[in-house]
Amino acid sequence: MKCENCQTISHSQSTYCGKCGKSLVKEVSLDYNKSIQNILIFFFILLGYIATINFIDFENDYINTLLIDVLFAAIIFVFYFIDFKTINKLLSLKGLKKFLLIKILVGAPLFAIIVSYLAGFLNQSIFDKSQLRYYEQFIDSPAPITLSIISIALIPAIFEEIAFRGILFNHLTKVSRLKSTILISSILFTILHLSLLSALWIFPIGLLFGYFRAKYRSLWYGILGHFMYNGSIVIIEIITFK
């Protein structure tokens, strides 16, 4: 942090400037309050977006689905440009671990298969209903497979990772420890999916992607994992569609 009096940079945990001795507590308090405010604004905007789309009928209406995808991307773009430099560093391709990327490429589809059958079993056993098939929204579209992969896999992979492991994660690190940041961002990620049953696998996924973000300072592991997981769910739905 920077001293207002002499402009000397001090350690983030310092309460007094090491050069002039001026108290830094006020500055810390202002930064803390601003970060909390940014977190709440971002979270409630996303919550408002999700609450709004619940009033839209998506059944076999791919146009509405694509429109709300565009709206979501636009919201994230606004916050992305506010924190442009920091997010861009997380999107650098330098230093990516190839072996880890391979493990994600293999592991995400396997996990998707497990979740797909588990979700189907739990929905039938607990709620006595079939699992929602997202692919059905695009059956009447000109390109059902392509559009379903773009909407269900590609857009969430990019923009949800930028939102939760990028923007939100960055603000949380300013007010909490790294482990708490991973935990809180995963909880908020789970809450905003508004599905009690899905929390059984969404929360662990959030923790894993948060860990990747914290350890490797990159969003690409989460983006790849997110895309492969959601994309595999789409492929499973297409294969089993009747």
Image (cartoon, grey):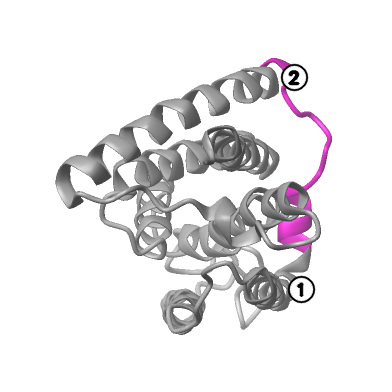
Spatial distance from mark 1 to mark 2, Cα to Cα? 29 Å
Asked if residue 31 shows in the view, the reply is no
Label 1 residue SS: helix
| Figure check: 222 above or below 1 | above
Q: Position of residue 55 (x, y in %)?
A: 44, 84
Reading the image, the residue beneath label 1 is 81
Magenta range: 85-99
For the N terminus, which image quadrant?
A: bottom right
User: Which residue is nearer to you in this view: 163 or 69?
Assistant: 69
Reading the image, the residue beneath label 2 is 98
User: Which residue is nearer to you in this view: 78 or 142?
Assistant: 142
Identified at 42% across, 80% down, the residue is 51
Identified at 23% across, 43% down, the residue is 124
Name the quadrant containing residue 26. Answer: bottom left
Side of 45 where 129 appears, left or right: left
| Figure check: 225 above or below 166 | above
The numbered disc on residue 108 is none
Asked if residue 226 shows in the view, the reply is yes
Q: Position of residue 160 (x, y in %)?
A: 59, 58
Q: In terms of sequence position, does the residue under pointer 1 or pointer 2 come before the other? A: 1
User: Which residue is nearer to you in this view: 232 or 180?
Assistant: 232
How packed is label 1: few (under 14 Cα within 10 Å), some, or many (20 or more)? few
- Residue flagged by tag 1: what amino acid is it? Phe
Q: Would you say the residues marked 1 and 2 are in contact, meaning their CB atoms lie under 8 Å apart?
A: no
User: Which residue is nearer to you in this view: 100 or 241?
Assistant: 241
**Residue 90, magenta (yes or no):** yes
**Residue 146, magenta (yes or no):** no
Label 2 residue SS: helix
Q: Position of residue 159 (x, y in %)?
A: 66, 60
Identified at 37% across, 31% down, the residue is 117
Q: Position of residue 103 (x, y in %)?
A: 61, 18
